[in-house]
Amino acid sequence: MYGNQTMPVPATHSPELDAPAAPLLEVFSSIQGEGALIGRRQVFIRFAGCNLKCGYCDTPYTPAAHCRVEKLPGSGAFTSWCNPVQLADVTAYVQSLLDPGSLCHRSHHSFALTGGEPLLHAALLKEWLPRLRTLLPVQVETNGTLPEALRQVLPWLDWISVDIKLESQTGEPTPWDLHREFIELALQVQCCVKLVVGNSTPGEELHRTAKLLQSLTTSTPPKHFDVVLQPRTINGQCSVSGRSLLQQQDILAGYGLDVRVIPQTHCFMQLL
Ligand code: SF4
C-alpha cells in the first residue's frame, strides 16, 4: 500500500524527510489530455491553492485535510493521505509505478505538476524537484502569473504549459504584463502556450494575444513554442463550434504562430 498513513518509517535518515511537506489535492497516473504532451502517460501531482478565480474553473483547489491517491492507474479506487504530504511518500508511490514488477513500469513519460497553481509552492518545489527529476522529467502546468516563482524552479523544468487567461472566459482582467514576463522566462525550456476559448471569445482578444506572442519570437535565433487553442469544456463536451475554432485559429496563424486546436481529450476517455 501507498500513503503516509501506511508507509513504514525509514530505518536510516533520508534527505527526503528534510524537504517541506506539500498540500496536495491528488496524485495519480493518467494520460495527458491537453496541450503539447497530449497522449503521454504522466504521473500527475496536483497541488492545492490558486491565486486566480477563473470563471470556468472546475478544480476544487482549496487545501483540504486529505488528498486522494489512485491505488491502481485507471481503477477509480482511491486511498486517502493526510495533508501536508511528505516527498518520501510521493517518491515511494512513483517508484512503485516504475518498479519492473508493475505492468506500467515503462509507460510513463514525465511528471505533470498541476493545480491549483503549483508555482505558489516554489520554495517547496526547489527542494522536491531535484529528487523528482531523478525519477522522470518534469512538466509544470501553470496559469502564467508568477514569474518570480518560475525563476526559482526553472533549472529543474523540462516543459512548461502556460495559460494566457482571457478575460472573456475567466471573468477577470487578463494580466498581460505578468503573462509577458512569465512567457519570456518560460521560453528558456520547451514551452506550450494555451488559451481556453469559447464561442464568444472576441477577435480583439486573440489579436492582442497574437501580438504579444509574435513579439516574443523576434529573437535570434527565433524561439519556437507551441500555441494551443483549447475549446472550453462544459459538462464533458466541447462547447465551441467548429466554425468558431477555425476562425480563431485563422487569427492566430495570421501572425505566423504555430497554432493547434486541441480539446480536453481526457474527458472523452473518462480519465482523470
Ligand atoms: S488558474 Fe486554474 S486552478 Fe486557478 S482558478 Fe484558474 S482554472 Fe482554476
Image (cartoon, helix red, strand yellow):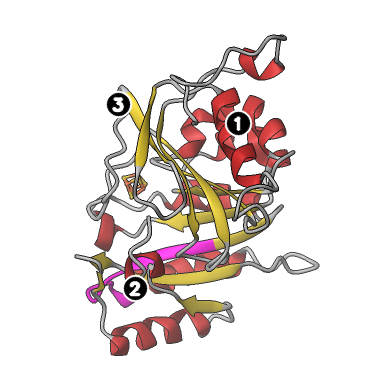
- Give the residue at x 45% y 66%: 209
**Residue hosting label 3:** 64
Q: CA distance from mark 1 to mark 3?
A: 22 Å
Position of residue 98 relative to residue 108, above or below, is above
Q: Nearer the viewer, residue 188 or 215?
A: 188
Query: Label 1 crowding class (10 Å Cα cut-off): few <14, some 14-19, many 20+?
Result: some
Q: CA separation, marks 2 and 3?
A: 39 Å
Nearest to viewer (mark 2 / mark 3)? 3
Quarter of the picture holding the C terminus: bottom left
The residue at 50%/29% (across/down) is 121
- The disc, 1 or 3, on the residue closer to the chain's N-terminal end is 3
Amino acid found under the numbered disc labelled 2? Glu
Q: Amino acid at mark 1?
A: Ala
Residue 59: say if magenta: no
**42 or 38, which is in the foreground?**
42
- From the image, tell me which residue sits under label 1: 92
* Residue 179 place in picture, x, y as percent: 49, 51
Q: Which residues are magenta?
A: 193-204
Q: Nearer the viewer, mark 1 or mark 2?
A: 1
What residue did someone put label 2 on?
204
Residue 236 lies left or right of residue 205; in this view the side is left
Amino acid type for the residue under numbered disc 3: Ala
Residue at image location 61% in from the left, 39% down from the top = 96
Q: Is residue 195 magenta?
A: yes
Q: CA distance from mark 1 to mark 2?
A: 48 Å
Foreground pick, 259 / 132: 132
Q: Secondary structure at mark 3?
A: loop
